[in-house]
Image (tube, grey):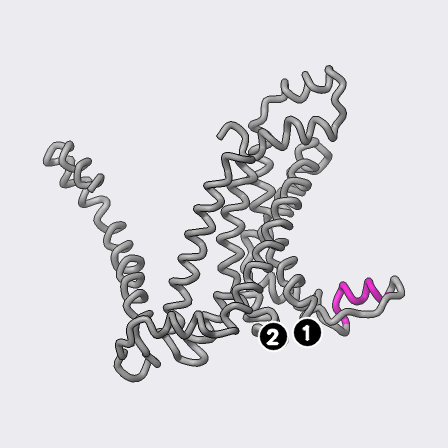
Amino acid sequence: MGFRRSLARLPQRDAFWALLLAGPTLLGILVFNLIPIAGSLWLSFTRWNLLSEPQFIGLKNYRDLFADSLFYQVMGQTFAFVAMVVLLEMVGGVLVAMALSSRIKGSKWLRTAYFLPFVTSMVAVSIVWGWVFDPANGALNLILRALGAAPVAWLSDPAIALPALAVLTAWKGLGYAMMLIFAGLQAIPTQYDEAASIDGANAVQRFFRITLPLLSPTIFLVAVLSTINAFQAFDAVYLLTGGGPSNRTTTIVYWLYQNAFIHYNLGKASAIAYVLFAVLFLLTLVQWGVRKKWVYAE
């Protein structure tokens, strides 16, 4: 409605050119976004194995989903995975950004080095970390052996596999979080820190009383983006663990993939997608609701 009202205010010639120029983009959104979204919603009320005709079954997929104990295990693992990734990216991003903002020698090169994993394919990153996690000759276990400790089965131990994948995912996203937080640090006026230093505040006090509150809007943005990206984790799980051992690294998106393209249950997979959408929507509302309590000047 807003787009139509905007067009109505334009002269007829300008409205024609506006529609002509925006037409390809709007058509692309319709074909590649809106139609698939509507089709997926309809499939969530059907039983379809990609071969036969879809059979309408109403809410059965959703009832079966919420009656499946594996669903709650997968959701719990997904929330644990997301919490670890978000915490690592936020804390790591702040620490790295603070270190690089101190004008140390070579900081520009270090910022590039930290940002490079973010623009690298997750497939390539997963393969490299697969070598790092290798139980026989991986870099981590070679270090443990050198220190006299026993090697660890990073990706086959049910208690360690999920945190290991969370570290991998956070390492890849750390560069993006660092760049956002670094930009937020540069936007903080230096006179606040200088005035507090003159008043006798030490570095720790200045960080928690001045820097962190003024940086909280940026940290909030990083938390929201990191949460959404972590919920969509798939590549590392697919390449390194396949959801194992004993489904202990199966996340919600990987379970969706299993139902759709391994078990050929497109109806249930579509229902999982819309449950994930609802979870992300509610979680975003909660995040926006609580931001006033800890985001400065909100």
Residue 106 rendering spot, x and y as whole percentages? 70, 38
Q: Nearer the viewer, residue 237 or 199?
A: 199
Residue 163 rendering spot, x and y as whole percentages? 66, 61
> Pointer 2: what residue?
244
In the rendered structure, the answer to whether residue 80 lies left or right of residue 8 reads right
Do the residues bearing badges 2 and 1 touch, measured as CB atoms within 8 Å?
A: yes
Instruction: Give the image quarter of residue 95.
Output: top right
Tell me the crowding category of disc 2: few under 14, some 14 to 19, or many 20 or more residues within 10 angstroms, Cα based. some
Residue 31 rendering spot, x and y as whole percentages? 26, 59
Our reading of the magenta stretch's main secondary structure is helix
Q: Nearer the viewer, residue 77 or 222?
A: 77
Tell me the crowding category of disc 1: few under 14, some 14 to 19, or many 20 or more residues within 10 angstroms, Cα based. some
Numbered-mark total: 2
Q: Residue furthest left?
A: 12
**Residue at 56% over, 39% down:** 219
> Pointer 1: what residue?
156
In the rendered view, tell whether residue 210 sits above or below residue 230: above
Residue 212 rendering spot, x and y as whole percentages? 63, 32
Q: Which mark is residue 205?
A: none
In the rendered view, tell whether residue 198 sits above or below residue 89: above
**Residue at 31% over, 83% down:** 51
**Residue at 43% over, 46% down:** 285
Q: Report the magenta residues as a range.
A: 137-145
Q: CA distance from mark 2 to mark 1?
A: 7 Å
In the rendered view, tell whether residue 129 sits above or below residue 179: below
In the rendered structure, the answer to whether residue 23 lies left or right of residue 147 reads left
In the rendered structure, the answer to whether residue 2 lies left or right of residue 297 reads left
In the rendered view, tell whether residue 262 sits above or below residue 75: below
Q: Is residue 28 magenta?
A: no
| Residue type pointed to by label 1 | Ser
**Residue at 43% over, 72% down:** 65
